[in-house]
Amino acid sequence: ILKAFAEEFDKNKIHTIFIALDKRPEEHLNLPSDVDYGFSSFDMVPFRQMYLIELAVAQAKRMCEMGKDVALIIDDLISVMKAYEYSTQKNNSEAEINIMIEIKKLLAVGRNTENGGSITLVATMCDAKTEKDKKYSEMFDKLCNTHIYLSRKLENLDSKYCVTPQSVTDNAYQLLDKGNLKLMQKFQERTEEKSINDAAEIYNEF
């Protein structure tokens, strides 16, 4: 899915930066030559992974200042969080605060500047397994403006859709046209307090 995002951005002349962290070597992707691709395997030390993230963010900001539209794709946020966590030298309470600050700085990179360029951030987040992962997952949910949940259940059922948009910001009108916005609002009303699988089944009706 992220590869498809990168190819679509590239096709529409949007400069694309793709960062993949903590992956197996065989997971290396073949992307268009115009895409800036940063890849770190699982044996790379966390400090180097953190440096790769910060370098990509700095590049995206400079290009935006130059008036270019940029897409920054990161796979995945849990790996980013762990890279920051392992790289800090402070005690546990201070480390947690620093990690949250760094993650917020990363998510805040998305922008649309007046008389300038823009940055679109697309990032994945694997299933939260530990209590700490769940805590950061909740923080991500509050800071992201659109969530898309992949539904393994729908995929196995050969459903029409295997992705479920779950929430958007109050400024959703800037992201969606009026028709899709009405559908999204109707979907949210029907799926309030529903599980992801139940929401996915309801979404399949739209």
Image: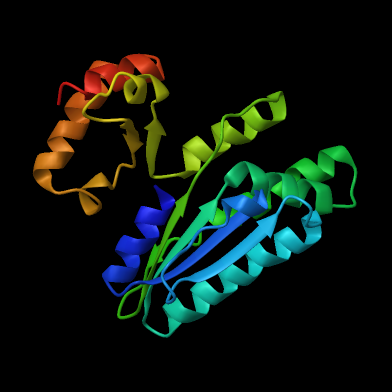
Image check: 201 left or right of 28? Answer: left
**In the foreground, 20 or 148:** 20
For the question of whether residue 100 can be seen, the reply is no
Above or below for 131 versus 53: above
Picture residue at 38% right of the left edge, 26% below the top: 151
Q: Where is residue 99 in the image (x, y as percent from the top left)?
A: 72, 47
Residue, far left: 179
Image check: 148 left or right of 55? Answer: left
Above or below for 31 versus 165: below
For the question of whether residue 181 can be seen, the reply is yes
Q: Where is residue 62 in the image (x, y as percent from the top left)?
A: 51, 80
Residue 55 occupies quadrant:
bottom right
Picture residue at 33% right of the left edge, 65% below the top: 9
Image check: 68 left or right of 99? Answer: left
Q: Where is residue 66 in the image (x, y as percent from the top left)?
A: 42, 85
Picture residue at 28% right of the left edge, 69% below the top: 11
Image check: 42 left or right of 188? Answer: right
Residue, far front: 26
Image quadrant occupied by the C terminus: top left
Q: Position of residue 6 (x, y in %)?
A: 39, 61
Above or below for 36 versus 93: below
How has the structure been colored for display? rainbow
